[in-house]
Amino acid sequence: MNALGLIEVIGYPCAIDAADAAAKSANIKVLGISKVGSGILTVQLSGDVGAINSAVAAGAASASKVGKVLHTHVIPRADNQIVEKGIVFLADKNNTNSNHGGLWDKSNAELKEMLLLNGAHDEKQLKYMKKEELIQLLQQGKDETDGAKG
């Protein structure tokens, strides 16, 4: 990944508008839209540094006409681990590149049950976690187990 562009907005229509304008303005890839919470969403883009700078500016300008843009940010040489480790959540949760297998298909209750069976967490700790956080915990446990085998 050359560069990672982020546009944080309030509201889904605003996020879609930002992604659309960004994609139309430069040769970039829209990685996805992540729900942060309380109506806040982050549009994630990748591509060449110049294209990402242009796309983030165009996306933010267009989205500001629809709603509120909270922040924009460009990481010029983002490390591939950001996407590989699930820090950037792809829009297509079933994408084989997301390294989460079929975890996105499971309900929060199923994910919590898997973590409880693992024994590393208690129910109070998991009660208010979002799906992304639960999957990260499961993935961390898998990585630690895989590392012990090697």
Image (cartoon, rainbow, N blue to C red):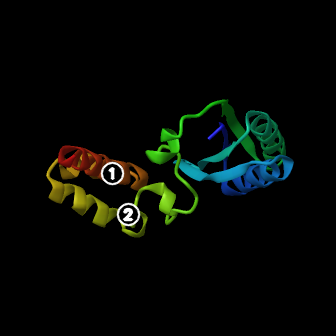
SS for callout 2: helix
Q: Nearer the viewer, residue 47 or 55?
A: 47
SS for callout 1: helix
Q: As displayed, is residue 71 above or below residue 127?
A: above
Residue 6 screen position, x and y as percent: 65, 39
Q: Tell me the residue at 79%/39% (across/down).
A: 51
Is 61 left, or right, of 98 in this rendering? right
Residue 7 screen position, x and y as percent: 68, 41
Q: Nearer the viewer, residue 129 or 45?
A: 45
Is 64 left, or right, of 123 in this rendering? right
Q: Tell me the residue at 50%/57% (across/down).
A: 97
State the residue position of label 1.
Answer: 139
State the residue position of label 2.
Answer: 103
Q: Nearer the viewer, residue 40 or 142?
A: 142
Q: Amino acid at mark 2?
A: Leu
Residue 84 screen position, x and y as percent: 47, 47
Q: In which quadrant of the rendered view does residue 79 lie?
A: top right
Residue 120 screen position, x and y as percent: 17, 47
**Image marks 2 and 1: residues in contact by CB distance under 8 Å:** yes
Mark 2 crowd level (few <14, some 14–19, many ≥20, 10 Å Cα):
some
Q: Residue furthest front?
A: 150
Q: Tell me the residue at 41%/58% (across/down).
A: 100
Is 35 left, or right, of 66 in this rendering? left
